[in-house]
Amino acid sequence: MEVFANPLMIIPGTLLSEDLTFLSSLVLIQLDKLNPLLFIALYTFGVIIGDIGLYGIGYLFRKKNHWRAVKHLQAWFHKKSFHSKDEITSFDYFLLFTRFIPGSRIPTYISCGITGYSLKKFSALLLFATLIFSIIGALLVLLVDQYFPINESIVFKLAVGFLSFFITSFVFRSIYFVSNLKKTYGSVFPFLWIKLVRLRRFEFWPILLMYLPIVPTYLYWIFRYRGFKPLYSNPAIKMSGICEENKSEIDHLIQIHLPENRLETVRIDHPKEIDSQQLSYEIRQSTLKFPFIVKPDNGLRGADVFKVYDFQDLIKRVKTFSKPIICQELSSKPKEWGVFFYRFPNQALGKIYSVNSKEFPTVRGDGKSTMLDLVMQVPEFQIRFDFILSDWKKYLNEIPKDGEQIQLVYRGSHSKGSIFKDASHLLNKKISHSLTQRLSLIEGFNYGRVDIRFDNLSDLESGQFDLIEINGAGAESTNFYDPKFSLFKAYRYMFGQWSLAFKIGHQTAKSTRPSFKELPLFLYGLFFGAR
């Protein structure tokens, strides 16, 4: 810390660690070893030099425009319209607040250089944010020093510096969050209150927080079974479905083993480059009919899943993808279930671990209320308003006709607004036998969740359903997102689910020697698997 007693050391200090330099400088201000105004000037100068340096690194990569990663990033930025010079975009607001979001700076600033974001705007926004950040931090420690002048403890002063850093970051992150609410929904406090209240329900907790208590048990399983055995549980699926699996490869699996339950699927390898004639030919070669679903061949949690209604809509959607996509037949069956299936390798017939039904929020117009009003009138819709309305932000103030029904969510993902409920009470012996018999036909699939659509329960008893998707070892037993479930009951399902993953993977694995090189992939699938 004493190194910053020489004010000029603040500049190189920011290049090593902005946050550590900030904290150390605030302590030195309290010890009267650093002038607050000099700190503000030098800290701001050092930070901006570092930020422009990161931008410069991105600019060097920009010249490598033949690299696929560079092309993808540039296409994504332009698709999101982040480069407008005439108005402030959502990305401009985000850039302004990266100063207060640890971990966001390096990738964001390098990306700005790669994509050609205006250097003038980049510098102006970050200069303003850094000045505000350093000024408020210095003022906070001066105020504390004014009221607690006799406390000379270095621990106390370090705590004050850390608290100042935390308060400054928290305030500005809150401003960013609140401004987004105001911009999107026209008001703040009702929606802010909903976000706070829903934290009482664990189904809305951050996924990392939800899984944190299970980590010690994972470590126990890893050492007990001498490796990350869930990665071996499904031999027919790449990485067993923990990550990197392709929906088209799984579709091929369904085509071989359950063709009568398959939905017509077409893979487009180079969507960004395909022309309209070739795209039309690909669709005509199949039995696909509009409307149908377009989604990434490799994607999680319902991201970038669209319903396309005609060929022009298809062309528009396809051009937004840079990686392979699939076009999938839209099931006409109204009911959807997530069926969690497992089977030990030495068993011919598997079992059903859990079943959850998926409800898709739908509103009915009265000729008076706006879309936003209709959503806020239903408690279960209200509490997940931002998930449900993520695709309807342009239509919030529109008034549906009296009697008009609008299905707001069509993706069976919890993070996209679907309501999950436990359906185990509907699983009779005939349905259970029919499902396990059908799913056990898929050779090399031993563990995961299968999403199916059907007309009625009697059809399920006879094996009549549309198989939308198979999610392997990275899937969750999503019945525990039922609002009626207690946290204890949810964890019971989670522990049971992952215990099965390790046992099945252990029996399936060819070797029981530890494979620590697989740890990153295991953790990725564990914390970012689809809900």
Image (cartoon, rainbow, N blue to C red):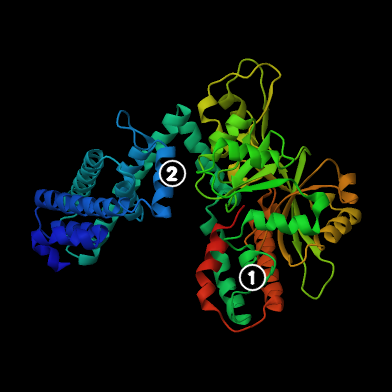
Residue hosting label 1? 230
Q: Regarding mark 1 in the picture, which secondary structure is present there? A: helix
Q: Is residue 110 left or right of residue 181?
A: left
Kind of residue sitting beneath label 1 = Pro
Crowding at mark 2 (Cα within 10 Å: few <14, some 14-19, many 20+): some
Question: In terms of sequence position, does the residue under pointer 2 or pointer 1 come before the other?
Answer: 2
Q: Quadrant of residue 403?
A: top right
Residue 223 drawn above or below residue 155: below
Q: Is residue 426 left or right of residue 110?
A: right
Counting from the top left corner in percent of width and height, residue 75 is at 42, 43
Q: CA distance from mark 2 to mark 1?
A: 33 Å
Counting from the top left corner in percent of width and height, residue 427 is at 84, 53
Front-most of 79 and 129? 79
Residue hosting label 2? 76
Crowding at mark 1 (Cα within 10 Å: few <14, some 14-19, many 20+): many
Q: Regarding mark 2 in the picture, which secondary structure is present there? A: helix
